[in-house]
Amino acid sequence: TGNPPTVRMAAQEATAKRIKLDDAGGFPVTAEQWAHFDAEGYVVLDRFQVLPEGAVDKLKERIDEIMLGTAKLDYSKLMMQLDSDTGRYEDIGEQSLGHKGSTLNYRKIQNLEHDDLFSHYIAHPVFEQACRRLYGQESISAFRIMFFNKPAGRGTNLPWHQDRWQHLDRDPLLTVWTALDDSSTLNGCVQVIPKSHHKGVLNKDHHSSFLTDAMVEEHCPEEKVINLELAAGQVALLHNWTIHRSGVNKSKDMARRAFSVNYMDGRTRLADPDKHQQNMVANKATGYAEGSDYFHEVFPSAKEH
């Protein structure tokens, strides 16, 4: 069988506005891009549509400082999970608060709203425009403001799943995924099943909507898989019900770092605190992470008072 097709978006340097990371800027999501999102369940934004050329380097430098323990922030508020040594999802580290040692081999770091640079980035005007299109004028919160990492020659297989969680009383609809490094099939790019968000939530029995083997066989045939290959600094918007996965990093010298934010209606609350606690205790590596019951407001309500 052949390799899955790849999505690549050409750089639009001729029209890109050169802005600093700490300035408002970027270009709103276009009608054509929204049409692709609605039909396919994802869209890759043009290069430099959100971040100008070179600005992503600041985010990369900051996340490396956080991993190495040299950043000036309260580490007791960050959920930090080490990567597995085997590449098996079942072998990943515990999802608990606090620094786990000076290493670049973290798999996931959550609650990054506590870092000034990342907190500023999640409030980018392009992201607010996208959120308003989906959620209207209500306040917008974020769940799982986090860094994903697949170190060179390492990384962990993430099985096919949808981003839907049992403990929330309403389903989020938008995930914003920013490539911090060039993301390719070699270093474990995200793979999606187009149009799968139209199927609704497939496995409501799993706390995080991971698909069963039978569901994978039915809904994820190889000929439907699309590789999302992004340049560093490029952004993808994903509908939360879009089925997706990622593999290990087979590169010898290139990490695959990414920053992911799940935006949701600000009225979202815990649907079942007891079930949330059960899924934290049941498996501290693959259940709910410490701090996952906290929803950070990013955009206040835009309604007139």
Image (cartoon, grey):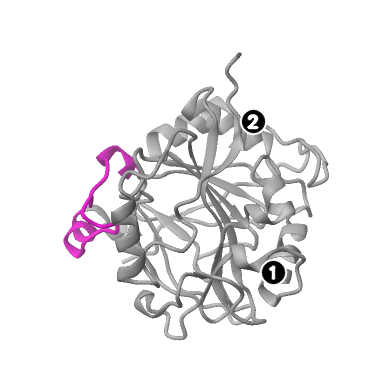
Q: Give whichever of 65, 85 is nearer the camera.
A: 65
Which quadrant is home to the C terminus?
top right
Looking at this view, name the residue that lies furthest to the front. Answer: 274
Q: Is residue 163 left or right of residue 95?
A: left
Q: Is residue 267 left or right of residue 260?
A: left
Find out whether residue 197 is within the magenta segment.
Answer: yes
- Choose the circle earlier in sequence order: 2 or 1: 2
Q: Give whichever of 80, 51 is nearer the camera.
A: 80
Looking at this view, name the residue that lies furthest to the bottom. Answer: 85
User: Eyeballing the image, is 63 above or below 21?
Assistant: below
Residue 198 in view here? yes
- Residue 66 image label: 1
Label 2: few (<14), some (14–19) or many (≥20) C-alpha neighbours in 10 Å: some
Q: Residue, x 63% and y 42% (percent of image)?
A: 46
Q: Position of residue 106 (x, y in %)?
A: 57, 74
Q: Position of residue 34 (x, y in %)?
A: 50, 30
Looking at this view, name the residue that lies furthest to the left. Answer: 214
Find out whether residue 105 is within the magenta segment.
Answer: no
Q: Is residue 165 left or right of residue 59?
A: left
> Which residue bears the numbered disc 2?
28
Main SS of the magenta segment? loop
Q: Residue, x 60% and y 47% (percent of image)?
A: 235
Which quadrant is home to the N terminus?
bottom left
Please tell me whether mark 2 sits on a helix, a strand or a loop.
loop
Q: Give whichever of 150, 301 is nearer the camera.
A: 301
- Disc 1 marks which amino acid? Ile
Tag 2 near tag 1, CB within 8 Å: no
- Disc 2 marks which amino acid? Pro
Q: Residue, x 39% and y 80% (percent of image)?
A: 91
